[in-house]
Amino acid sequence: ENGQRIATFNNWLMVIITLITVFVLALMVYVCWRFNERANPVPSKTTHSTVLEVAWTIVPILILLGIAIPSFRLLRYQLILPEGDVTVKAVGTGAWQWRYEYPKDQGDFSFTSVMLTEDEIKKAVAEGRGTAEDLPRLLAVDNELVLPVNKTIILQVTGEGYIHNFALPAFGLKVDAIPGRLNQAWFRAEREGLYYGQCSRLCGPNHAYMPIAIRIVSADAYAKWLEEAKKKFASTDAPTRIASNAAVAQQ
């Protein structure tokens, strides 16, 4: 939903910028044709026009206000967290990996998501566990973050050792993962599928190898995956406590 609003605002802004550019270009062409030396052998001595100067001051101000108001409205929509259906925590680790932690009401488990190497991708394709399109180079991971469709997801983001950034363009997400600080964002995916992102902060030598893969599934598929994930990741360390919205606001 956030991604759709951002895309709509961007498209609307591009239309305004295009219209302004076309208008200025047409005005320049007209001036070159209407006021060239051949058409005006005796140049005008006009040096001042109060109406024109007021117009080219007021009009840009109105245009900027027309852009700023929906821009701030969109920013407010992104920053004010709604009531969430699912809360999940993403931790950018010092080993240049992402660790995802689910709270008690979602199973109370955590797991690490690691990028697949090219050899691992080839092996997975050969074994029929995916296609080359499903497992893109530098984006495919061993454990995807699985979440339900049409649910409000509260994403808590932090870091360990280095400053990372959780960025997933399709959902309009770009959140800093800072050690010792918990940032929050939210999204609501309206379509099932696999969505990719990456760390967008220059965080060290393995910065390019921190992909993000989020698989959006139906509610039934999500419930089934939770049961399987609780068994699969039962031997891993228990997740850290998911902070409440009030606790984050106090930071």
Image (cartoon, helix red, strand yellow):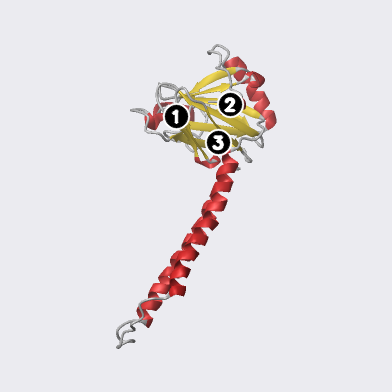
Closer to the chain start, of discs 2 and 1, is: 2
State the SS at label 2.
strand
Q: Is residue 77 above or below residue 17?
A: above
For label 3, count other residues whose C-alpha is less than 10 Å away and answer few (under 14), some (14-19) or many (20+): some
- Disc marking residue 88: 2
In this view of the protein, can residue 137 be seen by the observer? Answer: yes
Q: Residue at x 47, y 60 (%)?
A: 17
Task: Residue under label 3, please give it.
Answer: 194
- Disc marking residue 121: 1
Q: Is residue 32 above or below residue 11?
A: below
Q: Is residue 180 above or below residue 47?
A: above
Pointer 2 with pointer 1, Cβ within 8 A = no
Q: Residue at x 40, y 78 (%)?
A: 30
In whole angstroms, how far apart are the C-alphas of marks 2 and 1?
27 Å
For label 2, count other residues whose C-alpha is less than 10 Å away and answer few (under 14), some (14-19) or many (20+): some
Nearer to the camera, 32 or 197: 32
The quadrant of the image that shows the N terminus is: top right
Nearer to the camera, 25 or 136: 25
Mark 3 or 2, which is nearer the eye?
A: 2
Nearer to the camera, 126 or 196: 196
State the SS at label 1.
helix
Q: Residue at x 61, y 20 (%)?
A: 103
Amino acid type at mark 3: Leu
Pointer 3 with pointer 2, Cβ within 8 A = no
- Location of residue 122 in the rendering, given as x and y in whole percent from the top left corner: 43, 30
Closer to the chain start, of discs 3 and 2, is: 2
Closer to the chain start, of discs 3 and 1, is: 1
- Disc marking residue 13: none
Tell me: 218 left or right of 89: right
Q: Residue at x 41, y 28 (%)?
A: 163
Amino acid type at mark 2: Val
